[in-house]
Image (spheres, rainbow, N blue to C red):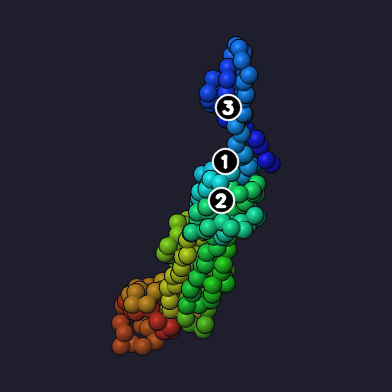
Amino acid sequence: TTQYVCTGWVGTGSVPPDGETASVSFTITNNSGIVWNWSTNYWLAVETAGSGGVDVASGWFAAGSNVNVTATPATGWHFVGWNGDTNGCDVEGVTLTAPMDRARTVEARFEIDRHTLEVVSAHGGNIPGTLEAAYGTELSLSSPNSPIIDGTTQHICIGAVVSGNAFTQPTPTSVLLTLTNNATLTWLWETRYLLAAYANEGGSVSGTGWYAADVVVTLTAIPAQHFQFVQWSDGVLSASRFVTVPAGGISFVALF
């Protein structure tokens, strides 16, 4: 790891007085002398650990010189520090200044970034809370508990929004993303209510089911053959077999 390089000579007598090459030609005609000049170089080995690079390649450097080496992390990685023979080196940020008073091996160390994904859901679902993962991790999340039924009230996941990170949504209850930033995923829910209607013998009712809040629904009483509609169980509503009512866990009976 030490190299000696001839840098020239100093001559007397028949030898030219000086030069900067490793060879000299002359005709000797009297007593002469030649002194070869040498310089010392040391090997600087520059290595990396993780994903990133340095701006100086391994090589020979003159003894007494100072070599500045700067580390640059790859996308999604960050610089951690310098390892190796850093005794006597000056470190400022990502730059190491190595005095070449001997051969050295230095290593720039990088680590992958880690990011968080906060999952927010008013009605549970896939891992509400905070996830942590390495940069570039592919995540698949879902809201498998939709719909949630509580008596005559129903909660349905209708989608999701993600702030801070790109994402795709194959279905309303699933999200795919590659984590590259700190982000928040919020599941979106819609509340629906059951509109129930029945008929006594002699007919049926159409229009029943789950509806979003504030939706107005038309119920239709359908008489069977040889029957006629009389009224709804609450005659005040309408004497017509068509009745418009708000959804909301209400039950009606059509009388025939």
The quadrant of the rendering that contains the N terminus is: top right
Mark 2 closeness class: few <14, some 14–19, many ≥20 residues within 10 Å: many
Q: Which residue is mark 3?
A: 9
Disc 2 vs disc 3: which is toward the camera?
Answer: 3
Q: Which numbered dot is residue 62?
A: 1
Front-lying residue, 147 or 109: 109
Q: Secondary structure at mark 1?
A: strand
**Residue for point 62% across, 39% down:** 40
**Residue for point 53% across, 23% down:** 17
Q: Which residue is outermost to the front?
A: 30
Q: Which residue is outermost to the right?
A: 1
Front-lying residue, 124 or 115: 115
**Residue for point 48% across, 73% down:** 120
Q: Which residue is mark 2?
A: 99
The quadrant of the rendering that contains the C terminus is: bottom left
Mark 1 and mark 3: span between their CA atoms? 18 Å
Q: Give the residue type at disc 1.
A: Ala
In the displayed structure, would residue 223 be above or below residue 68?
below
Q: Earlier in the sequence, mark 2 or mark 3?
A: 3
Q: Earlier in the sequence, mark 1 or mark 2?
A: 1
**Residue for point 64% across, 42% down:** 43
Tell me where residue 16 appears, x and y as whole percent: 54, 20
Mark 1 and mark 2: span between their CA atoms? 10 Å
Mark 3 closeness class: few <14, some 14–19, many ≥20 residues within 10 Å: many
Q: Give the residue type at disc 3.
A: Trp
